[in-house]
Every structure is written in C-alpha cells, then in structure tokens.
Image: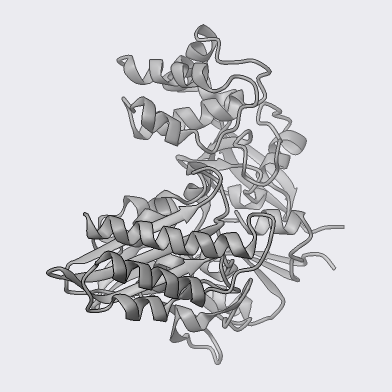
Amino acid sequence: MSVEHYWAPRTLDEALGHLAGGDVTILAGGTDLMPQKNAGRVRLGRGLLNLSRVDALRGVAVEKGCLRIGALATITELLAHAAVREHADVLAQACDRFASDQLRNAATIGGNVCNASPAGDTLVPLLVLDAEVELASRPNGSVATRTLPLAAFLTGPGRTARAPHELLVALRVPLRRAPAVGRFFKFGTRPALDISTISIGFAASRDGGTLRDVRLAYGAVAPVPMRSHAAEAALDGAALTDATIARAAAAAREDVRPIDDVRASAWYRRELVFNMTRRILDDVAHA
Amino acid sequence: MSLTREIGFVLNGVRTRATVPVAMSALDMLREVVGLTGTKYACGEGECGACTIVVDGRSLCSCLLFAVDCDGRELTTIEGAERDPLGARLEQAFVDCGAVQCGFCTPGMVMQAQHWLQAHPGASRDAILRAIEGNLCRCTGYVKIVDAIERVAREAP
C-alpha cells in the first residue's frame, strides 16, 4: 500500500488531529526516515505527516526549573544554544560528535529520541541528565500531555512507549544547582559520521574532592541506552582515587549487555567500557 | 500510482514549481524532475555529502530531504553557487588550487564550504576540516580542497 495523504500542518492541534486517524508516518528532519524507507526497513503509512512547519515544536527555553527542548530543535541549534552549554554540557558535547554538519543541520532531537537506536547519540547524555519526554495527544478534541522519564520511554531497539496517536513534543532536562562536571565519549573508527561502537556519558556534581549525584550511561552496549547504577554507586560520595575508578569501571563492565555485530564483538565492547570509563574518570580526577 | 504534490520554491533565485511523488527525495527532484544534474547522487544515505545543497541558509544532504518539504523554501545548488560572490570565489579557488580530480565530490564540497564560510568568515584550517567532515573525496587526499577553501577564508571579501 502506498501513501494516500500528505500533511504539512502549522499547528500542533492540526498535527495531532491527523495523527489520530492512525497508520501515520511522522517526518521531521528525515535523516533517519529517508534511508530507512529506501532500505525497506520502514514502510510508509497511509498518511505522511511532515512536522517541520509546526512552530510550537521549536525552540529551547529555560522554564519552571528545567531546560525545555522542543522536539524539532536541530542538533546544530542545540550546539549553538548558550543554555544547552550551561545546563546540559554533556548533551552539547554529544551534539559536537553527531554525524556531520549537513546532518546536524537537519536532524532533530525528537527524531533521534523516537528513532530509539541503541547507539543514538543524544540518548546517552539525555539519560545522564535525567531527561523526561513530553508527549501530546488529542483524544477528545482537546490536547492532553503526559510526561515520562526517558529511561521508561525507551523500550527496545527502535521501540518506544509512544502510542501511535501521540507526538513527542519536547524533552525536559531538570536544572541542577551544584556546579556540574560532564563528559561525553564516543568510540568509532573515525570522528565524523560514525555509528558508535560504544558511547559513554558522565555527569556529577563536585563536592570538594568527592563526587555526588553521579550519573553514568552507556550506548550501543544493550538493547537500549542504559545507566550503570552499580558504577554510579561505586563513585557516589567517594574520592576519585585509582582504586575507586577501577572499581567503578569494573562495575560498568559487569552491568552492560553488549552483542557481537559488524562494529565490534561483545567482548571488545566490554573491554572498551572498562578502559574508556577509566579514561574519562582519570580525566575528571586530574581536571 | 503514488501520491503526488505540486510544490513551489525558489531555486537559484528562480521561482519554480514541480509536481513530485510525496516520498521522492529533493535530490531526485533536482536531477529527474527539474533537470539540474550538478548535484550528485553517491551514497544515498547522508554519508558522503556529494548531494549537499543549501536550503533556507542550511546545508543539507538533498538525498535525505523529502522533495515535498522544499515547498515554500529557498534552494541553492551548485548551478546557482556563483550568484553569490563567495561561491564564485570558491569555484575559482578550486580551479586555481587544483582541488578537483574526478570532480564528483566537488559540487558538494563547494556548497558545504560556501555555507560554512558564510557563517564563519575567516575560518581556520582546523575549522575547515571539521566543516567538510561530511564530504568524502576518494581522489585528492583533501589537501588541495582544504587549500582552496582556506585561500578564500583568508582573502578579504
């Protein structure tokens, strides 16, 4: 079956109305949808809904104790935004390692999250930042929203908790008061345009020589990007000594559940997790 | 028969209308519907930059852009690059520096360089390397391409 309807609405209300009809493919930046369609991995639905003219889905703002990122914010826009650097530096670092300029100019954060790749570049930093997703729908003529943690939204490779009639409208990153340290690391065969073999996101607040509120997340080592709570526990409230660092890195290596694929074997990924976690923490200890 | 849409946009300064299947890429529209073949098809998945065009001031891989999304937008392709003095200088610099071998990557390189230098005049060599990291060249080894872009970045406009 081929596409029977194409819509390019300007308001969220209209967009949600089209979505309610069912069997609709959502288009934002197109950087994932087009190659997936061409490769036959995605079948276009009866309706094709182009969100790119819905201005309500744009913009980055600090409001109500959080950094609210509109789903249509492109990776380039995030890189250029001072509030992202200030409140979500680990995300800004990941955006700098995202694909290439041409792709950063088109790709949206909402698309990257909904695509739910185990290796999705923005997912690891968003997990580290305790991000929430804001979903909207129009069940009975009026717009309803619900919010859930990103960790609950990602349910499997390419799968999310988004219902077919729902739209991801924004991401919310809670603001933290304590001065924070953040690091993003991505391992690939070249810096640009590479799908991560593994990726690591780290954030914490600093309390003298010790770390508090430690968050460590890993990409491309499990069906969904994941936090390593065991590694976080090993670091929380501890001084960053060589022994602590080694303990945390070993805990992360135990926690991850990688597979063998074209980019690396499971064994190699585990070794990367250990060694690169150690490198990041060494770097933080000596910064 | 697949669903089509008639769209209107400005292409290299010229108001243009085209009827396109809704799932067609902007690259296919440029090459097959409009008939401008300067923009190249190579990888078809955003990895090589040969199809780079500028849309509303942003450089994009036209192979990943839905043609219908061009409705109401302003497109610049390699055929229109010289309309902008910066594009004309880049084209001349590519010639002068011998930055072209087979030439297949050249349109994408010029469009990406033009977009980048527009936003970052006087960009450093390192910044230029980052700017074209999404553009593959399999002939030159990049040195002369970067030389050409750097020459334009260093010149007073």
Q: Is residue B27 above or below residue A61?
A: above
Residue A247: which quarter of the image?
bottom left
**Residue B74 seen from this side:** yes
The outermost residue toward the bottom is A140
The outermost residue toward the left is A208
Quadrant of the frame with the N terminus of chain A: bottom right
The outermost residue toward the right is B1
Q: What residue do we see at 65% from left, 26% from top?
A: B138
Side (left or right) of A83 relative to A222: left
Position in image of residue A90 (x %, y %): 34, 61
Looking at this view, is B4 or A49 the one in front?
A: A49
Q: What residue do we see at 42% from left, 56% from top?
A: A185
Position in image of residue A281 (x %, y %): 32, 62
Position in image of residue A186 (x %, y %): 47, 55
**Residue A120 seen from this side:** no
Side (left or right) of B152 relative to B102: left
